[in-house]
Image (cartoon, grey):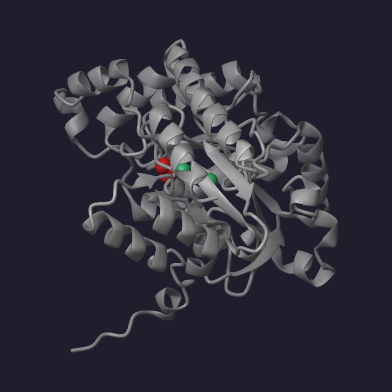
Amino acid sequence: MEFDRAIRLQELPPYLFVELDRKKAEALAKGVDVIDLGIGDPDLPTPDFIVKRMVTAVQEPGYHRYPSSQGMLSFRQAAAAWCKRRFGIDLDPESEVVATIGSKEAIAHFPLAFVDKDDIVLVPTPGYPVYHIGTLFSGGRSYFLPLLEENGFLPDLDAIPNDVLEKARILWLNYPNNPTAAVASLGFFEKVVDFATKHSIIVCHDAAYSEMTYDGYKAPSFLETPGAKDVGLEFHSLSKTYNMTGWRIGFTVGNPDLVGALRQVKSNVDSGQFEAIQEAAIAALESDQSCVDEMQRIYTKRRNVLVKGLRDLGLDAPLPSATFYIWTPVPKGYSSTEFSSLLLDRAGIVCTPGNGFGTPGEGYVRMALTVPKERLEEAIERLKSVL
Ligand SMILES: *Cc1c(COP(=O)(O)O)cnc(C)c1O
């Protein structure tokens, strides 16, 4: 038997890293000591006190039953209190916070609540692929907003045509940004609130990297902006902040009608996250955050090694103030794919070609700081003989 997959799967964009993955597997099979700067998944373990809380929580029979799909009240209270301490924003844990199974889940599901067939979603490019895929799954269409270096990798909202604005339901934003490592100011968020209010568009801000910052930089919350809670939501994640990518826990906060709609979708799709995991997440959120400082110290050293090394080799690598990505222009004469292939073939280094995140990413590669500092030094040594 052959079963045709639904059009929504057939229409998914091709996976652009197929060729790179194949080459990486080939290199590994040949015994090459591959340095993988390709994926944005922290190599550091989850802090011990969080793991310990999980170990005791998992033994509590009360947590072995179905959770509530919106998350335990104590988790939502801890998330609201964390937002208050970190950003000074007030959130009602009852109506303005929902627990998520990692933020990716919520990002993929949210459009189901507001996007009908042929509605438009405004999607930044290059960007995290899930904004576009969530749009496709909801039956909508993406209108891509190029993030260009000359605009500080912020979208040009004035350039969106009127007929697009009329059909647009959601605007996705993500700062600190993956893959460009750009940050946004409160001034930009103020413009976004005006824009969204004028055109009745829901703002969804993905804040996955809000804590992964350097040199004392504090990323603002979109919800700090006056009027933001009338138009938007913010998607938070414990994955990068506490090295918890495998645990699948996050939370979405903001406008109560929008939070309620996400809760309605989720209550029909999943039954929430395991409450023992929520308990461990509470321990993380309520801690003194010294584990976050420690994480920032480690990434700062790695960032400095890689950026200095790349610059010494003549690359024009910017020094990011947030995220664990270096988004660097490739040397003249190479495409993103050609340069990535060169690094893998000649130096055993995996990085991600920028065009994989969308056409305007052509001319860049993304390197993730998710290997120890010594491996980054080794990577620079190897590059010296190639470049
Ligand atoms: C890693 C990442 C996420 C989310 O991760 P979860 O593990 O699903 O919480 C969301 N957005 C961006 C841009 C990311 O890079």
Along the viewing direction, whichever of 117 and 256 lies nearer the viewer: 117
Residue 80 visible in the snapshot: no
Along the viewing direction, whichever of 172 and 294 lies nearer the viewer: 294
Q: How many marks?
A: 0
Residue drawn at the location 40% of the way across and 62% of the way down: 20
The x, y position of residue 1, in whole percent, is 18, 89
Q: Is residue 47 above or below residue 354?
A: above
Q: Is residue 111 above or below residue 242?
A: below
Q: Is residue 32 above or below residue 90?
A: below
Residue 359 visible in the snapshot: yes
Residue drawn at the location 62% of the way across and 36% of the way down: 312
Residue drawn at the location 31% of the way across and 24% of the way down: 279
The x, y position of residue 248, in whole percent, is 35, 40
Q: Is residue 281 left or right of residue 179?
A: left
- Quadrant in the picture for residue 286: top left
Residue drawn at the location 33% of the way across and 50% of the way down: 270
The x, y position of residue 143, in whole percent, is 67, 67
